[in-house]
Amino acid sequence: MRVTRQRSIVERLHSHGLASTEELAALCDVSLATVRRDLIELETAGALRRVHGGAVLDTADGRGAGVGTGDSPETDADAVRGFAEVAASDADDKRAVAVRAAAMVADGDCVILDIGTTTMMLARELRGRPVTVVTASLAVLDVLRDDPAVELVLLGGIVRRTYHSLVGTLTEDALRQVRATCAFLGASGVATDGTVLDTTLVEVPVKRTLLATSQRSVLLVDRHKFPGTGALRVCGLDEFDAVITTTGAHGPTLDAARAAGTEVHVV
Protein backbone atom coordinates (compact mmCIF):
# COMPACT_ATOMS: atom_id res chain seq x y z
CA MET A 1 0.00 0.00 0.00
CA ARG A 2 2.83 2.40 0.78
CA VAL A 3 4.39 1.83 -2.65
CA THR A 4 1.08 2.51 -4.41
CA ARG A 5 0.44 5.58 -2.26
CA GLN A 6 3.85 7.08 -2.87
CA ARG A 7 3.54 6.42 -6.59
CA SER A 8 0.25 8.34 -6.55
CA ILE A 9 1.93 11.25 -4.75
CA VAL A 10 4.75 11.44 -7.28
CA GLU A 11 2.33 11.17 -10.21
CA ARG A 12 0.22 14.01 -8.82
CA LEU A 13 3.30 16.20 -8.49
CA HIS A 14 4.45 15.17 -11.93
CA SER A 15 1.19 16.36 -13.45
CA HIS A 16 0.58 19.44 -11.27
CA GLY A 17 4.06 20.50 -10.15
CA LEU A 18 2.96 21.06 -6.55
CA ALA A 19 0.36 19.85 -4.06
CA SER A 20 -0.67 20.59 -0.50
CA THR A 21 -0.41 18.04 2.27
CA GLU A 22 -4.21 18.14 2.69
CA GLU A 23 -4.70 17.49 -1.03
CA LEU A 24 -2.37 14.50 -0.97
CA ALA A 25 -4.01 13.10 2.16
CA ALA A 26 -7.40 13.29 0.44
CA LEU A 27 -5.98 11.75 -2.73
CA CYS A 28 -4.57 8.76 -0.85
CA ASP A 29 -7.34 8.58 1.78
CA VAL A 30 -4.87 8.61 4.67
CA SER A 31 -4.01 10.90 7.58
CA LEU A 32 -1.86 14.01 7.33
CA ALA A 33 0.78 12.31 9.47
CA THR A 34 1.02 9.41 7.01
CA VAL A 35 1.43 11.77 4.06
CA ARG A 36 4.13 13.71 5.89
CA ARG A 37 6.06 10.48 6.48
CA ASP A 38 5.70 9.64 2.79
CA LEU A 39 6.96 13.06 1.78
CA ILE A 40 10.02 12.70 4.02
CA GLU A 41 10.86 9.32 2.43
CA LEU A 42 10.29 10.61 -1.10
CA GLU A 43 12.37 13.73 -0.49
CA THR A 44 15.24 11.57 0.77
CA ALA A 45 14.91 9.47 -2.39
CA GLY A 46 15.19 12.65 -4.46
CA ALA A 47 11.65 12.48 -5.85
CA LEU A 48 10.40 15.83 -4.55
CA ARG A 49 11.13 18.82 -2.35
CA ARG A 50 9.05 19.50 0.74
CA VAL A 51 7.82 23.06 1.22
CA HIS A 52 5.63 24.68 3.86
CA GLY A 53 2.22 23.01 3.63
CA GLY A 54 3.06 20.51 0.91
CA ALA A 55 5.59 19.49 -1.73
CA VAL A 56 6.83 20.41 -5.19
CA LEU A 57 8.45 18.41 -7.96
CA ASP A 58 11.99 19.75 -7.73
CA THR A 59 13.39 18.81 -11.16
CA ALA A 60 14.64 20.60 -14.23
CA ASP A 61 13.39 19.95 -17.74
CA GLY A 62 15.89 17.86 -19.61
CA ARG A 63 16.80 14.53 -21.11
CA GLY A 64 18.53 11.56 -19.53
CA ALA A 65 22.06 10.69 -20.51
CA GLY A 66 21.29 7.70 -22.63
CA VAL A 67 23.27 6.90 -25.77
CA GLY A 68 25.20 3.70 -25.29
CA THR A 69 24.44 3.49 -21.59
CA GLY A 70 21.22 1.49 -21.51
CA ASP A 71 19.11 4.49 -20.49
CA SER A 72 15.97 5.42 -22.37
CA PRO A 73 15.68 9.10 -23.32
CA GLU A 74 13.31 9.97 -20.50
CA THR A 75 12.94 13.33 -18.81
CA ASP A 76 14.50 14.22 -15.46
CA ALA A 77 11.05 14.04 -13.88
CA ASP A 78 10.53 10.50 -15.20
CA ALA A 79 13.96 9.50 -13.91
CA VAL A 80 13.30 10.89 -10.43
CA ARG A 81 9.91 9.23 -10.29
CA GLY A 82 11.40 5.88 -11.36
CA PHE A 83 14.13 6.02 -8.71
CA ALA A 84 11.58 6.86 -6.02
CA GLU A 85 9.44 3.88 -6.99
CA VAL A 86 12.46 1.57 -6.77
CA ALA A 87 13.34 3.06 -3.38
CA ALA A 88 9.84 2.40 -2.07
CA SER A 89 9.83 -1.18 -3.37
CA ASP A 90 10.82 -3.80 -0.76
CA ALA A 91 11.88 -0.95 1.51
CA ASP A 92 11.72 -2.99 4.73
CA ASP A 93 14.17 -5.58 3.38
CA LYS A 94 16.53 -2.89 2.09
CA ARG A 95 16.39 -1.05 5.40
CA ALA A 96 17.24 -4.24 7.33
CA VAL A 97 20.27 -4.81 5.10
CA ALA A 98 21.34 -1.19 5.52
CA VAL A 99 21.13 -1.34 9.32
CA ARG A 100 23.31 -4.45 9.41
CA ALA A 101 25.81 -2.87 7.03
CA ALA A 102 26.07 0.27 9.17
CA ALA A 103 26.98 -1.92 12.14
CA MET A 104 30.09 -3.03 10.21
CA VAL A 105 31.34 0.55 9.96
CA ALA A 106 33.54 1.86 12.77
CA ASP A 107 33.99 5.53 13.62
CA GLY A 108 36.88 6.92 11.62
CA ASP A 109 36.43 4.49 8.71
CA CYS A 110 36.56 5.56 5.08
CA VAL A 111 33.82 3.74 3.18
CA ILE A 112 32.76 3.73 -0.47
CA LEU A 113 29.06 3.53 -1.22
CA ASP A 114 27.92 2.23 -4.59
CA ILE A 115 24.87 3.60 -6.39
CA GLY A 116 21.39 2.27 -5.68
CA THR A 117 18.56 2.51 -3.20
CA THR A 118 20.01 0.15 -0.56
CA THR A 119 23.25 2.12 -0.33
CA MET A 120 21.14 5.28 -0.09
CA MET A 121 19.47 3.74 2.97
CA LEU A 122 22.89 2.84 4.34
CA ALA A 123 23.84 6.51 4.00
CA ARG A 124 20.86 7.39 6.20
CA GLU A 125 22.13 4.98 8.85
CA LEU A 126 25.55 6.68 8.76
CA ARG A 127 24.20 10.16 9.41
CA GLY A 128 25.80 11.72 12.48
CA ARG A 129 28.75 9.31 12.41
CA PRO A 130 32.38 10.55 12.23
CA VAL A 131 33.18 8.66 9.03
CA THR A 132 34.34 9.47 5.51
CA VAL A 133 31.96 8.48 2.72
CA VAL A 134 33.17 8.32 -0.89
CA THR A 135 30.47 7.89 -3.52
CA ALA A 136 29.34 8.33 -7.11
CA SER A 137 25.71 8.26 -5.96
CA LEU A 138 23.75 11.49 -6.16
CA ALA A 139 21.14 9.91 -3.86
CA VAL A 140 23.82 9.42 -1.18
CA LEU A 141 24.87 13.03 -1.73
CA ASP A 142 21.31 14.18 -1.07
CA VAL A 143 21.17 12.21 2.19
CA LEU A 144 24.52 13.39 3.58
CA ARG A 145 25.09 16.82 2.05
CA ASP A 146 23.98 18.70 5.19
CA ASP A 147 25.55 16.36 7.77
CA PRO A 148 28.56 18.06 9.43
CA ALA A 149 29.71 14.82 11.08
CA VAL A 150 30.30 12.97 7.80
CA GLU A 151 33.19 13.90 5.53
CA LEU A 152 31.61 13.44 2.12
CA VAL A 153 33.67 12.91 -1.05
CA LEU A 154 31.73 13.04 -4.33
CA LEU A 155 33.41 11.46 -7.34
CA GLY A 156 33.24 13.13 -10.75
CA GLY A 157 31.81 11.74 -13.96
CA ILE A 158 28.86 11.74 -16.34
CA VAL A 159 25.45 12.09 -14.70
CA ARG A 160 23.03 9.21 -15.25
CA ARG A 161 19.73 10.67 -14.17
CA THR A 162 17.84 7.37 -14.21
CA TYR A 163 20.15 5.86 -11.60
CA HIS A 164 21.10 9.09 -9.77
CA SER A 165 24.73 8.21 -10.41
CA LEU A 166 28.03 9.34 -11.90
CA VAL A 167 29.88 7.07 -14.33
CA GLY A 168 32.70 7.05 -16.84
CA THR A 169 36.46 7.45 -17.00
CA LEU A 170 36.53 10.38 -14.57
CA THR A 171 34.67 8.31 -11.98
CA GLU A 172 36.95 5.32 -12.37
CA ASP A 173 40.15 7.43 -12.32
CA ALA A 174 39.02 9.23 -9.16
CA LEU A 175 38.24 5.92 -7.46
CA ARG A 176 41.78 4.71 -8.12
CA GLN A 177 43.06 7.51 -5.89
CA VAL A 178 41.06 6.15 -2.94
CA ARG A 179 42.05 3.48 -0.44
CA ALA A 180 38.94 2.76 1.60
CA THR A 181 38.35 0.61 4.66
CA CYS A 182 35.29 -0.98 3.07
CA ALA A 183 33.22 -0.76 -0.10
CA PHE A 184 29.49 -1.50 -0.03
CA LEU A 185 28.11 -2.55 -3.40
CA GLY A 186 24.69 -3.26 -4.81
CA ALA A 187 23.72 -5.44 -7.77
CA SER A 188 20.82 -6.21 -10.05
CA GLY A 189 20.87 -9.78 -8.85
CA VAL A 190 22.90 -12.86 -7.98
CA ALA A 191 22.55 -15.93 -10.21
CA THR A 192 22.24 -19.38 -8.67
CA ASP A 193 25.86 -20.13 -9.68
CA GLY A 194 27.06 -17.16 -7.62
CA THR A 195 27.56 -14.71 -10.48
CA VAL A 196 26.93 -11.11 -9.41
CA LEU A 197 24.99 -9.35 -12.18
CA ASP A 198 24.22 -5.84 -13.34
CA THR A 199 21.98 -4.53 -16.09
CA THR A 200 23.93 -1.60 -17.53
CA LEU A 201 27.28 -1.61 -19.30
CA VAL A 202 28.62 1.70 -17.97
CA GLU A 203 28.08 0.75 -14.32
CA VAL A 204 30.10 -2.48 -14.44
CA PRO A 205 33.61 -0.90 -14.69
CA VAL A 206 32.78 1.39 -11.77
CA LYS A 207 31.73 -1.56 -9.62
CA ARG A 208 34.89 -3.48 -10.50
CA THR A 209 37.01 -0.45 -9.60
CA LEU A 210 35.16 -0.19 -6.28
CA LEU A 211 36.20 -3.74 -5.47
CA ALA A 212 39.84 -3.00 -6.30
CA THR A 213 40.16 0.10 -4.13
CA SER A 214 38.97 -1.22 -0.76
CA GLN A 215 40.48 -3.38 1.92
CA ARG A 216 37.15 -5.11 2.37
CA SER A 217 34.06 -5.46 0.17
CA VAL A 218 30.46 -6.18 1.13
CA LEU A 219 27.58 -6.98 -1.23
CA LEU A 220 24.15 -5.63 -0.24
CA VAL A 221 21.34 -7.63 -1.87
CA ASP A 222 18.01 -8.42 -0.27
CA ARG A 223 16.18 -11.73 -0.80
CA HIS A 224 14.40 -10.47 -3.93
CA LYS A 225 17.74 -10.47 -5.75
CA PHE A 226 18.77 -13.93 -4.56
CA PRO A 227 18.49 -15.30 -7.17
CA GLY A 228 18.12 -12.32 -9.48
CA THR A 229 18.64 -11.29 -13.06
CA GLY A 230 21.00 -9.09 -15.04
CA ALA A 231 22.62 -8.97 -18.45
CA LEU A 232 26.24 -8.41 -17.42
CA ARG A 233 28.67 -10.20 -15.12
CA VAL A 234 30.37 -8.04 -12.49
CA CYS A 235 32.28 -10.76 -10.65
CA GLY A 236 31.76 -13.90 -8.64
CA LEU A 237 30.16 -13.86 -5.21
CA ASP A 238 33.38 -15.33 -3.84
CA GLU A 239 35.19 -12.06 -4.66
CA PHE A 240 33.33 -10.34 -1.81
CA ASP A 241 34.46 -10.59 1.78
CA ALA A 242 30.84 -10.57 2.95
CA VAL A 243 27.27 -10.49 1.71
CA ILE A 244 24.26 -9.17 3.58
CA THR A 245 20.80 -10.36 2.61
CA THR A 246 17.43 -11.10 4.15
CA THR A 247 15.56 -14.26 5.13
CA GLY A 248 14.28 -16.06 2.05
CA ALA A 249 17.38 -15.65 -0.12
CA HIS A 250 18.35 -18.71 -2.19
CA GLY A 251 19.87 -21.16 0.30
CA PRO A 252 22.15 -23.22 -1.98
CA THR A 253 23.76 -20.07 -3.39
CA LEU A 254 24.42 -18.78 0.11
CA ASP A 255 25.88 -22.16 1.10
CA ALA A 256 28.23 -22.01 -1.90
CA ALA A 257 29.32 -18.51 -0.84
CA ARG A 258 30.08 -19.75 2.67
CA ALA A 259 32.06 -22.67 1.27
CA ALA A 260 34.14 -20.21 -0.79
CA GLY A 261 35.01 -18.25 2.34
CA THR A 262 32.54 -15.38 2.02
CA GLU A 263 30.84 -14.25 5.22
CA VAL A 264 27.06 -14.48 4.91
CA HIS A 265 24.82 -12.32 7.07
CA VAL A 266 21.09 -13.01 6.89
CA VAL A 267 18.92 -10.41 8.63
Image (cartoon, helix red, strand yellow):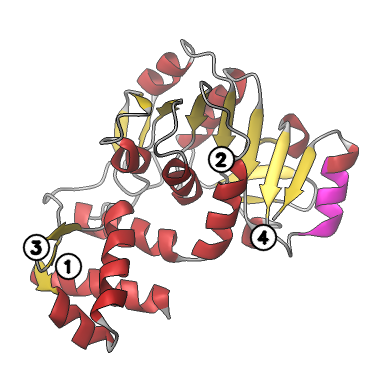
Residue 102 painted magenta:
no
Q: Quadrant of residue 37?
A: bottom left
Which residues are drawn in magenta?
250-257
Let me know if residue 207 appears in the view.
yes
- Badge 2 is on which residue? 102
Q: Return the residue found at the far right.
A: 259
Q: Position of residue 267 (x, y in %)?
A: 69, 56
Look at label 2 and name its amino acid.
Ala
Quadrant location, the N terminus? bottom left
- Badge 3 is on which residue? 52
Look at label 3 and name its amino acid.
His
Disc on res. 223 = 4
| Circles 4 and 3 in contact, beta carbons < 8 Å | no
| Circles 1 and 2 in contact, beta carbons < 8 Å | no
Look at label 4 and name its amino acid.
Arg
Q: Which of marks 4 and 2 is in front?
A: 2
Badge 3 crowding class, 10 Å Cα cut-off, few under 14, some 14 to 19, many 20 or more, is few
- Badge 1 is on which residue? 14
Q: Is residue 104 left or right of residue 115?
A: right
| Circles 4 and 2 in contact, beta carbons < 8 Å | no
Q: Which of 200 and 88 is in front in this view?
A: 88
Q: What element carries label 1?
A: helix
Which sits earlier in the primary sequence, circle 4 or circle 1? 1
At 72% from the left and 37% from the top, the residue drawn is 242
